[in-house]
């Protein structure tokens, strides 16, 4: 896969990132959906926080506030809008999925973000995880290898007003060396092993969270960098779509 394969309609912005050109419907003064009075899914979202997150041990107040603020129904295809708060991953097109709310929250909590971090996500998908991360870190870069998903996520995040998220299209297993180091990294697809470039682009004391395993079963690993050593903890079992790229699976593994 070619690196730096950027899309028509994208433009270069500060520190080398590529962003979708502003959309006509992103008018100044347009209300941010998170602030809008109409909130058709407020009850479902509150129940998701309680039943799927707090009861399973997610107590980080920042993570809970972010999960309470981001409107998940805006990130799923129209036909799944009514099911946006289910305790499950949902299809987002091209055989890919938006992760289950609990996994998004658990991975985010493991990063211990404080508001000052430069964050890198691999596997933008629909952009939901990136929106959550943008509530907790200073700036979020997110790489998606499928151009259609990258451009629709960039358009969605722009429309919804997530100004600190920058979408890149390319092979995320290579990271973004020109923008490294990153204080926190989150890989939202299953890797056969930890991609070396991601390790080397992690800042001192930074954390990298990713699922590692085979096509069907993985474990969430959290690596913390201390000099050239990486303290590694195993969090829990999980199942993600494969990370396909130079330092991931070369081809989709058989499932
Ligand atoms: N975080 C996403 C869910 C991601 S699903 C969300 O909130 O919706 C995993 C995504 O990783 C898919 O969109 C898939 O296309 C992407 N992906 C797989 N291999 C990749 C690679 N090497 N680089 C970047 N993205 C990759």
Image: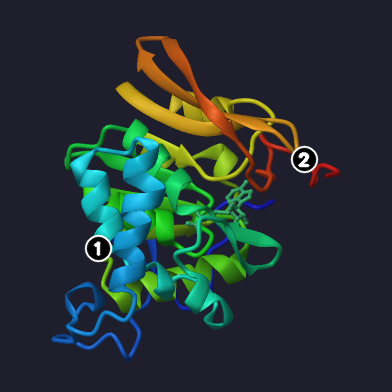
Image height of 13 relative to 61, above or below:
below
Image height of 35 relative to 98, above or below:
below
Q: How many marks?
A: 2
Question: Quadrant of residue 223 in the image?
Answer: top left
Helix, strand or loop at label 2? It is loop
- Residue 230 locus on image (x, y percent): 44, 13
Closer to us: 247 or 102 = 102
Which quadrant of the rendered structure holds the C terminus?
Answer: top right
Foreground tag (2 vs 1): 1
- Residue 99 locus on image (x, y percent): 53, 53
Q: Residue at x 41, y 54 (%)?
A: 129
Closer to us: 101 or 242 = 101
- Residue 69 locus on image (x, y percent): 24, 63
Closer to us: 59 or 117 = 59
Disc 1 target residue: 69
Q: Which label was assigned to residue 250?
A: 2
């Amino acid at each position: 896969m070619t690196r730096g394969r950027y899309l028509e309609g994208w433009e270069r912005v500060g520190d080398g990132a590529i962003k979708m050109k502003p959309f006509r419907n992103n008018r100044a003064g347009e209300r941010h959906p998170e602030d809008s009075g109409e909130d058709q899914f407020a009850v479902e979202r509150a129940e998701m926080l309680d039943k799927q997150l707090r009861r399973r041990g997610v107590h980080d107040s920042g993570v809970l506030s972010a999960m309470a603020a981001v409107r998940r129904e805006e990130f799923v295809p129209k036909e799944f809008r009514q099911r946006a708060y289910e305790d499950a991953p949902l299809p987002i097109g091209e055989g890919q999925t938006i992760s289950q709310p609990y996994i998004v929250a658990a991975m985010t909590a493991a990063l211990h973000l404080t508001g000052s971090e430069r964050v890198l996500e691999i596997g933008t998908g629909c952009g939901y995880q990136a929106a959550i991360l943008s509530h907790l870190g200073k700036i979020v870069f997110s790489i998606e290898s499928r151009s259609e998903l990258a451009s629709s996520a960039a358009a969605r995040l722009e429309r919804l007003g997530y100004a600190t998220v920058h979408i890149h299209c390319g092979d995320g297993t290579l990271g973004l060396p020109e923008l490294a180091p990153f204080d926190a990294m989150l890989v939202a697809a299953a890797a056969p092993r930890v991609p070396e470039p991601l390790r080397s682009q992690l800042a001192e004391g930074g954390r990298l969270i990713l699922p590692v395993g085979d096509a069907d079963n993985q474990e969430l690993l959290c690596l913390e960098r201390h000099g050239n050593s990486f303290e590694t903890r195993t969090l829990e079992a999980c199942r993600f779509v494969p990370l396909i790229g130079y330092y991931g699976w070369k081809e989709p593994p058989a499932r």
